[in-house]
Image: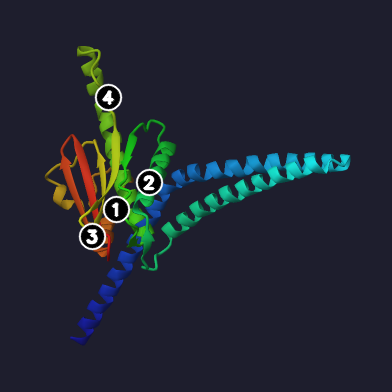
Amino acid sequence: VARQTGEIRQTLENLKSTQSQLIQSEKMASLGELTAGIAHEIQNPLNFVNNFSEVSTEMIDEMNEEMDKGDLKEARAISNDLKQNLEKISLHGNRASSIVKGMLEHSRNTSGEKELTDINALADEYLKLAYHGLRAKDKDFNASFETYFDKSIPKIAVIPQDIGRVLLNLINNAFYACTERSRSAVDEKQQAESLKPNAESYKPMVTISTKNSNGKAEITISDNGNGIPQNIIDKIFQPFFTTKPTGKGTGLGLSLAYDIVKAHGGELKVETIENEATTFKIQIPTKN
C-alpha cells in the first residue's frame, strides 16, 4: 500500500509538472502571436527617437555657430528648442521601454499578485497588438475592428498579464474566424455578383466592448465569422480541443482563458450562431 501511495504521489507530481510546462508553452505561443504586433508598436517611438536625435545633432551645430558669432540670444533660443527635443526623446524612449516591459511580463511566470488595472486600456492595448501582429503575418488580412468602452468602469484588481492572455487569445480567435469566413466567402461573392452586380460583399468585423454591469466589469468580444457548430460548443473549453489545422493552435488557449477568468472569481461565456457570429463574454467582479 505504501509503495502504491508513493507511486500515485509521484504520478501526481509528474502531472503537475507537465501541466506547468504546458501552460508555460501556451504563454510562449501567445507571446509569439504578440511579436509582430510589438515590433510594429515599438517601431513608432523608435522612429521618433531617431528623428529627434538627428535634428538635435544639427541644432547643436547651429548653436555652436551662433555662439562663435557671439549671438547668445539665438544660441539660447536654439538651446530651448533642443531641450524640448530631448524631452520628446525621453517620452518616446519610455514608451518603447514600457512596450518591452509588457512583453517581458507576458512571458514570465506571474507572481499571482493582483494590481488595480484599467480594463479599457488593457483591452485596447491587446486589441491593437493582435491586429498589427496579424497584419504583419498575413498580407491578405483585411478585418476591421470597433471598440465601445464604458468609461464608468473603475480600475479593478486583476493580474494584468493573465487577463491580457485571455484577451489576446479571444481576439486572435475572433480575427481568425473572420479571416476563415472571408476566404470561404470569395466564391460565394463571385457567384452573387454574377447574378446581382451590386451584391454586398462580406465585411469581416471584430467588436470589443466593455460595460459596468451590476458590480461586474464585462468585456465582450464579438466577431461575424463562421460561428461555432452546436455539436462542439460544449467542448471548446476542454484542454487540447481545437478546430484549427495542425500547427495553427495548441488547443490550450480557451482552456487556459477559462481557468484564468475563474481564478479571478469571474465567468467566461460564449454565444454563437453557426455561420453568422460568435460572442465571448468575460465578467469579472469590480470588487474582489
The residue to which callout 1 is attached is: 253
Tell me the residue at 39%/68% (across/down): 111
The residue to which callout 4 is attached is: 186
Q: Secondary structure at mark 3?
A: loop
Mark toward the viewer: 3 or 1: 3
Q: Report whether residue 176 is seen.
A: no
| Crowdedness near tag 3: few (<14), some (14–19) or many (≥20) residues, C-alpha within 10 Å | some
What number is the disc on residue 276?
A: none
The residue to which callout 2 is attached is: 124
Q: Secondary structure at mark 2?
A: helix
Mark toward the viewer: 2 or 1: 2
Above/below status of 246 relative to 164: above
Tag 1: amino acid? Gly
Q: Position of residue 286 (x, y in %)?
A: 27, 60
Lower sequence index among marks 2 and 1: 2
Q: CA distance from mark 3 to mark 2?
A: 20 Å
In the figure, residue 6 lies in which quadrant?
bottom left
| Crowdedness near tag 4: few (<14), some (14–19) or many (≥20) residues, C-alpha within 10 Å | few
Q: CA distance from mark 2 to mark 1?
A: 20 Å
Tag 4: amino acid? Val
